[in-house]
């Protein structure tokens, strides 16, 4: 099959966008030009879903005609473009660096941004992608490698003349990790202090949401009581709940993908079991009674759709609400931190807490073991009592020197 006709370098293009309602891809973008050799009138067109995509395609064709940019590359989505230029983008790197870069591209960049045309990727889109990786508890080095490969691919797009500047050169994201380190000085900085505060937050989010959707309160309380990620709350099905033992088997999570929100396996690809405490059982029981199929979702948005941390944020005006309540730094992911901190304070052993959290590393779990001052005092008192109980009445006594 012959390759599609492309505008020769240097020709002037006439462009237009036609809207054809009722079609899946209702916008038809077209460029026309006069061939400098045959003098024949030529044209090329494509159909897309949005007027922005149509304009991006036209801009790509115009850029190609002006400067010799590959017009096909200029209109590619990031995933496709990255695969075509990856060898160039990563040239000069050692093998030990290539592997984590390619893993970051495959596991994080493509699922988050791969569906977006290269020309339409912005600083804001990259910012949101990076912070979603941080919210998923990826390590600093993992996020750094994922961002680094994206920077290199986008830099190749700059060299190809597809974009004018590199939108992947974002800053400030490492402050999230510094904040996690700073919490050692303020152990409760990323957790709500008590049950009353949690229910107050849940009620305030409902009040601020459209039509006062009470489901948002259930999502927030369930996430905190189970120390679960918001995506995992979205993935709960009726069949995952054992009502006799009040246990939840976490099998899936909702995550962004090129086609929108999808369900996939949990992080680490391992199912885990989480206890459902008394405080959250009425919510779960009410929702179980309302569904008819084992595979029915327990938690959905007001229109029955999947939930993500971004959906919860936008629907409840999260940032505005937490600022009003005096928790301006509270993120949706901190509901998980709240649950794990409460469990640690309740004396849940670290190896059990690790299983509930689904952490791959014990070091990650240990970040949640922040004893408060009273706990430290109680530990000292308990140790003294233990030693006194074991000390024989007539045995040798320690003497101060």
Image: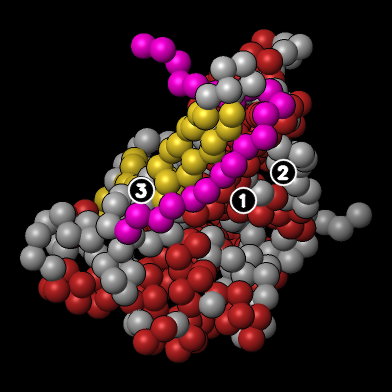
Q: Which residue matches tag 3?
A: 25
Q: Quick one: SS at disc 2?
A: loop
The quarter of the picture where residue 147 lies is top right
Q: Is residue 15 magenta?
A: yes
Question: On the image, which quarter does residue 37 sit in?
Answer: top right
| 3 or 1: tag closer to the N-terminus | 3
Query: Residue at left 40%, top 56%?
Result: 19
In what quadrant of the picture does the C terminus appear?
A: bottom right
**Magenta run includes residue 306:** no
Disc 3/disc 1 C-alpha distance (Å):
23 Å
Image point 49% across, 21% down: which residue?
5
Q: Which residues are magenta?
A: 1-21
Q: Residues within 10 Å of mark 2 (few under 14, many from 20)?
A: many
* Residue 329 x/y as whole percent: 67, 70
Residue annotated with mark 1: 125
Which element carries disc 3, helix, strand or loop? loop
Q: Quadrant of residue 296?
A: bottom left
* Residue named by callout 2: 167
Q: CA distance from mark 3 to mark 2?
A: 28 Å
Q: Earlier in the sequence, mark 2 or mark 1?
A: 1
Q: Identify which residue is drawn at 64% across, 60% down.
A: 370
The answer to whether marks 3 and 1 mark residues whose Cβ atoms lie closer than 8 Å is no
Residue farthest toward the front in the current orientation of the protein: 39
What crowding class fits label 3: few (fewer than 14 Cα within 10 Å), some (14-19), or many (20 or more)? some
User: Closer to the camera: disc 3 or disc 1?
Assistant: 3
Question: CB under 8 Å between callouts 2 and 1?
Answer: yes
Looking at the rendered structure, the number of numbered marks drawn on it comes to 3
Residue 2 at x, y percent in the picture:
41, 12
Extreme residue in the left direction: 292
Asked if 254 appears above or below 3 in the picture, the reply is: below
């Amino acid at each position: 099959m012959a390759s599609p006709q492309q505008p020769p370098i240097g020709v002037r293009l006439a462009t237009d966008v036609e809207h054809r309602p009722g079609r899946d891809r209702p916008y038809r973008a077209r460029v026309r030009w006069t061939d400098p050799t045959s003098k024949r009138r030529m044209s090329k067109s494509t159909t897309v879903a949005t007027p922005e995509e149509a304009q991006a395609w036209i801009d790509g064709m115009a850029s190609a005609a002006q400067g010799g940019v590959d017009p096909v590359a200029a209109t590619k989505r990031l995933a496709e473009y990255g695969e075509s230029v990856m060898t160039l983008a990563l040239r000069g790197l050692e093998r030990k660096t290539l592997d984590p870069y390619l893993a970051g591209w495959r596991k994080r960049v493509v699922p988050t941004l791969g569906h977006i045309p290269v020309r339409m990727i912005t600083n804001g889109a990259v910012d949101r992608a990076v912070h979603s990786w941080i919210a998923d508890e990826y390590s600093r080095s993992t996020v750094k490698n994922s961002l680094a490969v994206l920077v290199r691919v986008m830099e190749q797009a700059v060299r190809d003349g597809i974009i004018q500047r590199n939108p992947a050169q974002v800053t400030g994201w490492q402050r999230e990790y510094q904040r996690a380190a700073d919490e050692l000085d303020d152990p409760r900085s990323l957790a709500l202090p008590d049950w009353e505060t949690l229910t107050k937050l849940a009620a305030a989010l409902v009040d601020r949401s459209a039509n006062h959707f009470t489901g948002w309160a259930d999502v927030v309380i369930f996430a905190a009581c189970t120390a679960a990620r918001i995506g995992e709350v979205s993935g709960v099905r009726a069949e995952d709940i054992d009502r006799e033992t009040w246990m939840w088997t976490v099998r899936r999570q909702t995550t962004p993908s090129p086609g929108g929100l999808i369900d996939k396996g949990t992080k680490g690809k391992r199912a885990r079991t989480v206890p459902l405490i008394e405080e959250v059982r009425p919510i779960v029981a009410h929702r179980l009674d309302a569904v008819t199929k084992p595979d029915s979702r327990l938690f959905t948005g007001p229109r029955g759709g999947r939930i993500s941390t971004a959906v919860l944020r936008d629907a409840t005006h999260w940032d505005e609400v937490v600022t009003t309540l005096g928790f301006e730094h509270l993120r949706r992911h901190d509901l998980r931190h709240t649950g794990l901190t409460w469990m640690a304070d309740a004396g849940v052993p670290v190896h059990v807490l690790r299983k509930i959290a689904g952490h791959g590393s014990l070091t990650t779990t240990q970040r949640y073991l922040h004893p408060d001052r009273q706990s430290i005092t109680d530990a000292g008192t308990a140790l003294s009592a233990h030693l006194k109980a074991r000390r024989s009445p007539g045995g040798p006594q320690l003497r101060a020197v």
